[in-house]
Protein backbone atom coordinates (compact mmCIF):
# COMPACT_ATOMS: atom_id res chain seq x y z
CA UNK A 1 0.00 0.00 0.00
CA UNK A 2 1.45 3.35 -1.04
CA UNK A 3 -1.18 5.40 0.73
CA UNK A 4 -2.61 5.38 4.23
CA UNK A 5 -6.28 4.53 4.59
CA UNK A 6 -8.61 4.24 7.56
CA UNK A 7 -9.24 0.63 8.54
CA UNK A 8 -12.94 0.13 9.11
CA UNK A 9 -13.96 -2.71 11.46
CA UNK A 10 -15.91 -5.32 9.51
CA UNK A 11 -17.05 -7.55 12.42
CA UNK A 12 -18.35 -5.75 15.53
CA UNK A 13 -17.22 -7.18 18.88
CA UNK A 14 -19.31 -6.90 22.06
CA UNK A 15 -17.05 -4.47 23.90
CA UNK A 16 -19.56 -3.50 26.60
CA UNK A 17 -17.94 -3.27 30.02
CA UNK A 18 -19.39 -3.64 33.49
CA UNK A 19 -19.04 -0.60 35.76
CA UNK A 20 -19.39 -2.91 38.77
CA UNK A 21 -16.29 -4.91 37.86
CA UNK A 22 -12.57 -4.46 38.47
CA UNK A 23 -10.07 -5.61 35.81
CA UNK A 24 -6.90 -6.95 37.42
CA UNK A 25 -4.78 -7.06 34.25
CA UNK A 26 -4.76 -3.34 33.44
CA UNK A 27 -1.07 -2.75 34.21
CA UNK A 28 1.46 -4.86 32.28
CA UNK A 29 4.09 -3.70 34.76
CA UNK A 30 2.40 -5.92 37.36
CA UNK A 31 2.09 -3.13 39.92
CA UNK A 32 -1.08 -3.00 42.06
CA UNK A 33 -4.15 -1.43 40.50
CA UNK A 34 -5.70 -0.66 43.91
CA UNK A 35 -3.91 0.34 47.13
CA UNK A 36 -5.78 0.64 50.42
CA UNK A 37 -4.62 1.37 53.96
CA UNK A 38 -6.83 0.54 56.92
CA UNK A 39 -6.30 2.09 60.37
CA UNK A 40 -8.18 0.96 63.48
CA UNK A 41 -8.13 1.98 67.12
CA UNK A 42 -9.03 -1.56 68.21
CA UNK A 43 -7.45 -4.92 67.22
CA UNK A 44 -8.96 -5.96 63.88
CA UNK A 45 -8.77 -9.05 61.70
CA UNK A 46 -8.83 -9.34 57.92
CA UNK A 47 -12.08 -10.31 56.21
CA UNK A 48 -12.16 -10.28 52.41
CA UNK A 49 -14.68 -11.65 49.93
CA UNK A 50 -15.17 -11.16 46.19
CA UNK A 51 -16.45 -12.80 43.02
CA UNK A 52 -13.71 -13.73 40.57
CA UNK A 53 -13.53 -14.79 36.90
CA UNK A 54 -10.49 -15.71 34.82
CA UNK A 55 -9.05 -17.90 32.06
CA UNK A 56 -5.50 -17.03 33.17
CA UNK A 57 -3.41 -19.64 34.97
CA UNK A 58 -1.06 -17.45 37.01
CA UNK A 59 -0.99 -14.08 38.73
CA UNK A 60 -1.64 -12.14 41.94
CA UNK A 61 -5.10 -11.43 43.34
CA UNK A 62 -4.24 -9.43 46.44
CA UNK A 63 -1.70 -8.71 49.18
CA UNK A 64 -2.53 -7.90 52.81
CA UNK A 65 -0.21 -7.06 55.70
CA UNK A 66 2.63 -4.72 56.54
CA UNK A 67 5.93 -4.08 54.77
CA UNK A 68 8.08 -6.70 53.05
CA UNK A 69 9.96 -7.81 56.18
CA UNK A 70 6.93 -7.90 58.48
CA UNK A 71 3.80 -10.11 58.50
CA UNK A 72 1.85 -10.48 55.25
CA UNK A 73 -0.11 -12.80 52.96
CA UNK A 74 -0.43 -12.94 49.18
CA UNK A 75 -3.33 -14.74 47.51
CA UNK A 76 -2.35 -15.78 43.99
CA UNK A 77 -3.17 -18.18 41.19
CA UNK A 78 -0.69 -20.78 39.94
CA UNK A 79 -1.50 -23.54 37.47
CA UNK A 80 -5.14 -22.46 37.73
CA UNK A 81 -5.38 -23.10 41.50
CA UNK A 82 -5.31 -20.74 44.47
CA UNK A 83 -1.95 -20.33 46.17
CA UNK A 84 -1.29 -18.58 49.47
CA UNK A 85 2.14 -17.21 50.30
CA UNK A 86 2.52 -16.00 53.86
CA UNK A 87 5.22 -14.61 56.11
CA UNK A 88 4.88 -14.56 59.90
CA UNK A 89 7.73 -13.76 62.31
CA UNK A 90 10.27 -13.90 59.50
CA UNK A 91 9.22 -17.41 58.41
CA UNK A 92 7.76 -17.86 54.93
CA UNK A 93 5.43 -20.59 53.69
CA UNK A 94 3.61 -21.45 50.48
CA UNK A 95 0.49 -23.59 50.29
CA UNK A 96 -1.84 -24.43 47.43
CA UNK A 97 -5.12 -26.28 47.40
CA UNK A 98 -8.63 -26.33 46.04
CA UNK A 99 -10.15 -26.78 42.60
CA UNK A 100 -8.95 -25.42 39.27
CA UNK A 101 -10.73 -22.07 38.98
CA UNK A 102 -9.46 -20.60 35.68
CA UNK A 103 -12.47 -21.88 33.73
CA UNK A 104 -13.99 -18.46 33.06
CA UNK A 105 -17.00 -18.93 35.35
CA UNK A 106 -17.78 -16.63 38.27
CA UNK A 107 -16.98 -17.99 41.72
CA UNK A 108 -16.90 -16.48 45.20
CA UNK A 109 -13.57 -16.43 47.05
CA UNK A 110 -13.21 -15.46 50.70
CA UNK A 111 -10.29 -15.07 53.11
CA UNK A 112 -10.96 -14.80 56.84
CA UNK A 113 -8.42 -14.25 59.59
CA UNK A 114 -9.36 -15.93 62.87
CA UNK A 115 -7.45 -15.90 66.17
CA UNK A 116 -4.65 -18.23 65.10
CA UNK A 117 -5.63 -19.38 61.62
CA UNK A 118 -6.57 -18.31 58.11
CA UNK A 119 -9.56 -19.76 56.26
CA UNK A 120 -9.83 -19.61 52.47
CA UNK A 121 -13.07 -20.64 50.79
CA UNK A 122 -14.22 -21.08 47.19
CA UNK A 123 -17.99 -20.90 46.77
CA UNK A 124 -18.39 -21.27 50.56
CA UNK A 125 -16.36 -24.51 50.61
CA UNK A 126 -13.18 -24.38 52.70
CA UNK A 127 -10.13 -25.16 50.54
CA UNK A 128 -7.37 -24.06 52.95
CA UNK A 129 -7.05 -23.76 56.72
CA UNK A 130 -3.64 -22.51 57.78
CA UNK A 131 -2.37 -22.14 61.34
CA UNK A 132 -0.56 -18.83 61.88
CA UNK A 133 1.29 -17.21 64.78
CA UNK A 134 0.49 -13.54 64.59
CA UNK A 135 -1.83 -10.86 63.25
CA UNK A 136 -1.95 -9.17 59.85
CA UNK A 137 -2.83 -5.81 61.41
CA UNK A 138 0.28 -4.32 63.03
CA UNK A 139 0.32 -1.80 65.87
CA UNK A 140 2.00 1.46 64.86
CA UNK A 141 1.77 4.78 66.75
CA UNK A 142 -1.25 3.60 68.71
CA UNK A 143 -3.19 2.41 65.64
CA UNK A 144 -3.69 -1.05 64.18
CA UNK A 145 -2.77 -0.76 60.49
CA UNK A 146 -3.05 -2.94 57.38
CA UNK A 147 -1.96 -2.37 53.78
CA UNK A 148 -4.03 -4.07 51.09
CA UNK A 149 -3.15 -4.06 47.38
CA UNK A 150 -5.11 -5.65 44.54
CA UNK A 151 -3.58 -7.04 41.33
CA UNK A 152 0.00 -6.79 42.58
CA UNK A 153 2.21 -6.49 45.65
CA UNK A 154 3.99 -3.47 47.20
CA UNK A 155 7.46 -4.97 46.67
CA UNK A 156 9.28 -6.91 43.95
CA UNK A 157 7.88 -10.35 43.12
CA UNK A 158 11.38 -11.85 43.23
CA UNK A 159 11.26 -11.19 46.99
CA UNK A 160 8.24 -13.44 47.48
CA UNK A 161 8.80 -16.83 49.07
CA UNK A 162 8.19 -18.35 45.66
CA UNK A 163 8.51 -15.92 42.71
CA UNK A 164 5.48 -15.63 40.45
CA UNK A 165 4.43 -13.71 37.35
CA UNK A 166 2.12 -11.10 38.96
CA UNK A 167 0.19 -10.28 35.77
CA UNK A 168 -3.35 -11.65 36.02
CA UNK A 169 -5.98 -11.23 33.32
CA UNK A 170 -8.88 -11.62 35.72
CA UNK A 171 -12.01 -9.85 36.88
CA UNK A 172 -13.45 -9.07 40.32
CA UNK A 173 -16.92 -7.95 41.30
CA UNK A 174 -18.98 -7.69 44.53
CA UNK A 175 -15.80 -7.21 46.55
CA UNK A 176 -15.95 -6.65 50.28
CA UNK A 177 -12.73 -5.63 52.02
CA UNK A 178 -13.13 -5.44 55.81
CA UNK A 179 -16.93 -5.29 55.65
CA UNK A 180 -17.31 -2.78 52.87
CA UNK A 181 -15.32 0.21 54.03
CA UNK A 182 -13.95 0.97 50.56
CA UNK A 183 -16.61 2.90 48.64
CA UNK A 184 -14.01 5.07 46.89
CA UNK A 185 -12.93 2.13 44.68
CA UNK A 186 -16.33 1.91 43.01
CA UNK A 187 -16.39 5.64 42.28
CA UNK A 188 -12.90 5.50 40.75
CA UNK A 189 -13.82 2.57 38.49
CA UNK A 190 -16.96 4.33 37.21
CA UNK A 191 -14.77 7.16 35.91
CA UNK A 192 -12.19 4.91 34.19
CA UNK A 193 -13.42 2.22 31.79
CA UNK A 194 -9.89 0.78 31.55
CA UNK A 195 -10.40 -0.46 35.12
CA UNK A 196 -13.57 -2.31 34.05
CA UNK A 197 -13.94 -5.83 32.62
CA UNK A 198 -15.74 -6.95 29.50
CA UNK A 199 -19.28 -7.94 30.48
CA UNK A 200 -18.85 -11.21 28.58
CA UNK A 201 -15.51 -12.87 27.81
CA UNK A 202 -14.22 -16.12 26.36
CA UNK A 203 -10.79 -17.64 25.82
CA UNK A 204 -8.17 -15.99 23.64
CA UNK A 205 -6.30 -12.69 23.52
CA UNK A 206 -7.99 -9.49 22.37
CA UNK A 207 -6.10 -6.93 20.30
CA UNK A 208 -8.01 -3.62 20.16
CA UNK A 209 -6.29 -2.30 17.02
CA UNK A 210 -3.65 -0.38 18.96
CA UNK A 211 -0.43 -1.75 20.35
CA UNK A 212 1.48 -5.03 20.21
CA UNK A 213 3.29 -7.60 22.33
CA UNK A 214 7.04 -8.07 21.93
CA UNK A 215 9.22 -11.09 22.77
CA UNK A 216 12.93 -11.86 22.63
CA UNK A 217 13.29 -15.25 20.92
CA UNK A 218 16.22 -16.85 19.13
CA UNK A 219 15.48 -18.87 16.01
CA UNK A 220 19.00 -20.20 15.40
CA UNK A 221 19.84 -23.71 16.65
CA UNK A 222 23.16 -25.59 16.35
CA UNK A 223 23.01 -28.56 13.97
CA UNK A 224 22.94 -31.97 15.61
CA UNK A 225 26.50 -33.22 15.96
CA UNK A 226 28.01 -30.11 14.38
CA UNK A 227 28.30 -27.00 16.52
CA UNK A 228 29.86 -25.07 13.64
CA UNK A 229 26.65 -25.28 11.57
CA UNK A 230 23.41 -23.63 12.54
CA UNK A 231 19.88 -24.41 11.49
CA UNK A 232 16.91 -22.13 11.77
CA UNK A 233 13.18 -22.37 11.48
CA UNK A 234 10.18 -20.20 12.24
CA UNK A 235 6.96 -22.07 13.00
CA UNK A 236 3.86 -20.09 13.96
CA UNK A 237 0.29 -21.32 14.42
CA UNK A 238 -2.43 -18.74 14.97
CA UNK A 239 -6.17 -18.94 15.39
CA UNK A 240 -7.76 -15.60 14.51
CA UNK A 241 -11.22 -14.04 14.63
CA UNK A 242 -10.62 -10.61 13.11
CA UNK A 243 -12.63 -7.46 13.66
CA UNK A 244 -10.91 -5.73 10.71
CA UNK A 245 -9.52 -6.91 7.38
CA UNK A 246 -6.03 -5.37 7.66
CA UNK A 247 -3.33 -5.82 10.29
CA UNK A 248 -0.09 -7.52 11.29
CA UNK A 249 -0.50 -10.88 13.02
CA UNK A 250 3.18 -11.74 13.53
CA UNK A 251 6.48 -10.16 12.56
CA UNK A 252 10.21 -10.25 13.12
CA UNK A 253 11.89 -6.87 13.39
CA UNK A 254 15.63 -6.42 12.97
CA UNK A 255 17.95 -3.59 13.79
CA UNK A 256 17.46 -0.32 11.93
CA UNK A 257 13.66 -0.97 11.94
CA UNK A 258 13.79 -3.54 9.14
CA UNK A 259 11.03 -6.17 8.99
CA UNK A 260 12.64 -9.41 7.75
CA UNK A 261 9.45 -11.50 8.13
CA UNK A 262 5.78 -10.66 8.57
CA UNK A 263 2.40 -12.39 8.48
CA UNK A 264 -0.51 -10.04 7.90
CA UNK A 265 -4.05 -9.46 6.70
CA UNK A 266 -4.36 -7.12 3.73
CA UNK A 267 -7.27 -5.99 1.55
CA UNK A 268 -5.32 -5.16 -1.61
CA UNK A 269 -3.15 -6.93 -4.22
CA UNK A 270 -0.45 -4.35 -4.93
CA UNK A 271 0.88 -5.80 -8.22
CA UNK A 272 -2.52 -6.60 -9.73
CA UNK A 273 -4.09 -3.42 -8.29
CA UNK A 274 -6.92 -5.61 -7.04
CA UNK A 275 -9.13 -4.82 -4.05
CA UNK A 276 -9.44 -8.22 -2.38
CA UNK A 277 -8.86 -9.83 1.01
CA UNK A 278 -5.60 -11.79 1.45
CA UNK A 279 -3.38 -13.28 4.09
CA UNK A 280 0.25 -12.69 3.12
CA UNK A 281 3.68 -13.82 4.26
CA UNK A 282 6.43 -11.38 3.39
CA UNK A 283 10.22 -11.08 3.64
CA UNK A 284 10.88 -7.35 3.99
CA UNK A 285 8.47 -5.80 1.46
CA UNK A 286 8.35 -8.83 -0.86
CA UNK A 287 5.33 -11.15 -0.58
CA UNK A 288 6.61 -14.75 -0.65
CA UNK A 289 3.22 -16.44 -0.18
CA UNK A 290 -0.37 -15.26 -0.48
CA UNK A 291 -3.86 -16.70 -0.08
CA UNK A 292 -7.17 -15.06 -0.90
CA UNK A 293 -9.67 -15.41 1.94
CA UNK A 294 -12.68 -13.68 3.46
CA UNK A 295 -11.85 -13.09 7.11
CA UNK A 296 -14.80 -10.78 7.78
CA UNK A 297 -17.15 -13.73 8.25
CA UNK A 298 -17.37 -13.85 12.07
CA UNK A 299 -15.55 -17.22 12.07
CA UNK A 300 -12.29 -18.48 13.52
CA UNK A 301 -9.52 -19.19 11.01
CA UNK A 302 -6.38 -21.24 11.50
CA UNK A 303 -3.32 -19.54 9.96
CA UNK A 304 -0.02 -21.45 10.01
CA UNK A 305 3.43 -20.62 8.69
CA UNK A 306 6.64 -22.60 8.57
CA UNK A 307 9.83 -21.09 7.20
CA UNK A 308 13.27 -22.74 7.13
CA UNK A 309 16.39 -22.78 4.93
CA UNK A 310 14.68 -24.61 2.11
CA UNK A 311 10.97 -24.19 2.75
CA UNK A 312 8.21 -21.59 2.92
CA UNK A 313 4.73 -22.71 3.89
CA UNK A 314 1.57 -20.68 4.51
CA UNK A 315 -1.72 -22.49 5.12
CA UNK A 316 -5.10 -21.04 6.07
CA UNK A 317 -7.77 -23.49 7.23
CA UNK A 318 -5.77 -26.26 5.57
CA UNK A 319 -5.46 -24.51 2.19
CA UNK A 320 -1.92 -23.74 1.04
CA UNK A 321 -0.87 -20.27 -0.06
CA UNK A 322 0.66 -19.57 -3.46
CA UNK A 323 3.93 -17.86 -4.29
CA UNK A 324 4.39 -15.42 -7.15
CA UNK A 325 8.19 -15.69 -7.00
CA UNK A 326 10.50 -17.87 -9.06
CA UNK A 327 12.54 -20.53 -7.25
CA UNK A 328 15.68 -18.37 -7.35
CA UNK A 329 13.79 -15.29 -6.09
CA UNK A 330 12.40 -17.35 -3.22
CA UNK A 331 15.87 -18.63 -2.31
CA UNK A 332 17.20 -15.06 -2.36
CA UNK A 333 14.47 -14.04 0.11
CA UNK A 334 15.26 -16.97 2.41
CA UNK A 335 18.98 -16.14 2.29
CA UNK A 336 18.14 -12.55 3.22
CA UNK A 337 15.97 -13.74 6.13
CA UNK A 338 18.74 -16.04 7.39
CA UNK A 339 21.13 -13.10 7.54
CA UNK A 340 18.73 -11.25 9.84
CA UNK A 341 18.20 -14.29 12.07
CA UNK A 342 21.96 -14.66 12.52
CA UNK A 343 22.16 -11.18 14.02
CA UNK A 344 19.34 -9.95 16.24
CA UNK A 345 15.59 -9.91 15.73
CA UNK A 346 12.66 -9.18 18.02
CA UNK A 347 9.32 -10.98 17.72
CA UNK A 348 6.17 -8.86 17.49
CA UNK A 349 2.57 -10.07 17.77
CA UNK A 350 -0.42 -7.93 16.82
CA UNK A 351 1.49 -5.05 15.28
CA UNK A 352 4.79 -3.33 14.60
CA UNK A 353 6.84 -0.59 16.25
CA UNK A 354 7.46 2.65 14.37
CA UNK A 355 8.91 1.34 11.09
CA UNK A 356 8.89 2.97 7.63
CA UNK A 357 5.68 2.10 5.75
CA UNK A 358 7.83 1.00 2.80
CA UNK A 359 9.67 -1.65 4.87
CA UNK A 360 6.82 -4.17 4.79
CA UNK A 361 3.46 -4.55 3.00
CA UNK A 362 1.33 -3.90 6.13
CA UNK A 363 2.14 -1.78 9.19
CA UNK A 364 -1.36 -1.55 10.73
CA UNK A 365 -2.18 -3.08 14.12
CA UNK A 366 -4.28 -6.23 14.20
CA UNK A 367 -7.81 -5.86 15.58
CA UNK A 368 -9.63 -8.91 16.89
CA UNK A 369 -9.16 -12.11 18.81
CA UNK A 370 -6.07 -14.31 18.38
CA UNK A 371 -4.18 -17.16 20.01
CA UNK A 372 -0.61 -17.95 18.97
CA UNK A 373 1.65 -20.99 19.19
CA UNK A 374 5.37 -20.75 18.51
CA UNK A 375 6.94 -24.07 17.55
CA UNK A 376 3.85 -25.82 19.01
CA UNK A 377 4.08 -24.03 22.38
CA UNK A 378 1.29 -21.64 23.39
CA UNK A 379 2.45 -18.03 23.56
CA UNK A 380 1.53 -16.41 26.89
CA UNK A 381 1.31 -12.63 26.49
CA UNK A 382 1.89 -12.24 30.23
CA UNK A 383 5.42 -13.53 29.57
CA UNK A 384 6.16 -10.89 26.93
CA UNK A 385 9.07 -8.47 27.24
CA UNK A 386 6.52 -5.74 26.54
CA UNK A 387 2.76 -5.67 25.97
CA UNK A 388 0.38 -2.78 25.36
CA UNK A 389 -1.92 -2.38 28.38
CA UNK A 390 -5.09 -2.50 26.23
CA UNK A 391 -4.35 -6.02 24.94
CA UNK A 392 -6.02 -8.63 27.15
CA UNK A 393 -3.76 -11.67 27.50
CA UNK A 394 -6.24 -14.45 28.28
CA UNK A 395 -9.73 -13.15 27.51
CA UNK A 396 -11.59 -12.03 24.42
CA UNK A 397 -15.10 -10.60 24.08
CA UNK A 398 -17.51 -12.33 21.69
CA UNK A 399 -18.68 -10.78 18.46
CA UNK A 400 -22.03 -9.03 18.69
CA UNK A 401 -23.69 -11.77 16.63
CA UNK A 402 -22.10 -14.50 18.75
CA UNK A 403 -23.29 -13.29 22.16
Image (cartoon, rainbow, N blue to C red):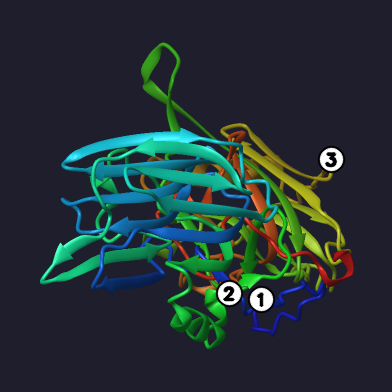
> Considering the numbered disc 3 on the image, is that residue within a helix, a strand or a loop?
loop
From the image, tell me which residue sits under label 1: 18
Above or below residue 352? Residue 239 is above
- Direction from residue 65 to residue 355 in the image, left or right: right
47 and 194: which is toward the camera: 47
- Direction from residue 92 to residue 282 in the image, left or right: right
> Considering the numbered disc 2 on the image, is that residue within a helix, a strand or a loop?
loop
- Of the image marks 1 and 3, the number of the one nearer the N terminus: 1
Q: Mark 2 and mark 1 in contact (Cβ < 8 Å)?
A: yes
Residue at image location 62% in from the left, 76% down from the top: 20
Above or below residue 130? Residue 158 is below
- Between the residue at mark 3 and the residue at mark 2, the CA separation in whole angstroms equals 38 Å
Residue at image location 23% in from the left, 46% down from the top: 134
Mark 2, Cα crowd under 10 Å, few <14 / some 14-19 / many 20+, is many
The mark lying in front, picked from 1 and 3, is 1
Would residue 215 be seen by someone viewing this image from the given angle? Answer: no
The quarter of the displayed image where residue 116 is located = top left
136 and 211: which is toward the camera: 136
Residue at image location 34% in from the left, 64% down from the top: 148
Amino acid sequence: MNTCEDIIPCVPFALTKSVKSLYLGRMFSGIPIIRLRFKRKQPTRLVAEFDFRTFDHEGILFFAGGHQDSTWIVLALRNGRLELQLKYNGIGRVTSSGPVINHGMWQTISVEELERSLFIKVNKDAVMKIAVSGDLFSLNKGLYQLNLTVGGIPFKTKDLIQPINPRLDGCMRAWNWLNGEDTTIQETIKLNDKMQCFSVAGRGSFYPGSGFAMFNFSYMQPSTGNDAEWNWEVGVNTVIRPAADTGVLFALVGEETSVPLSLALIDYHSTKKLKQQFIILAVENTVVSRLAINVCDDQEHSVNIFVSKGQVSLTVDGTAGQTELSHSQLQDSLFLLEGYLQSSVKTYVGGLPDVPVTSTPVTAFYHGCMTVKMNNKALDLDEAFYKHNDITSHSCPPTETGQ
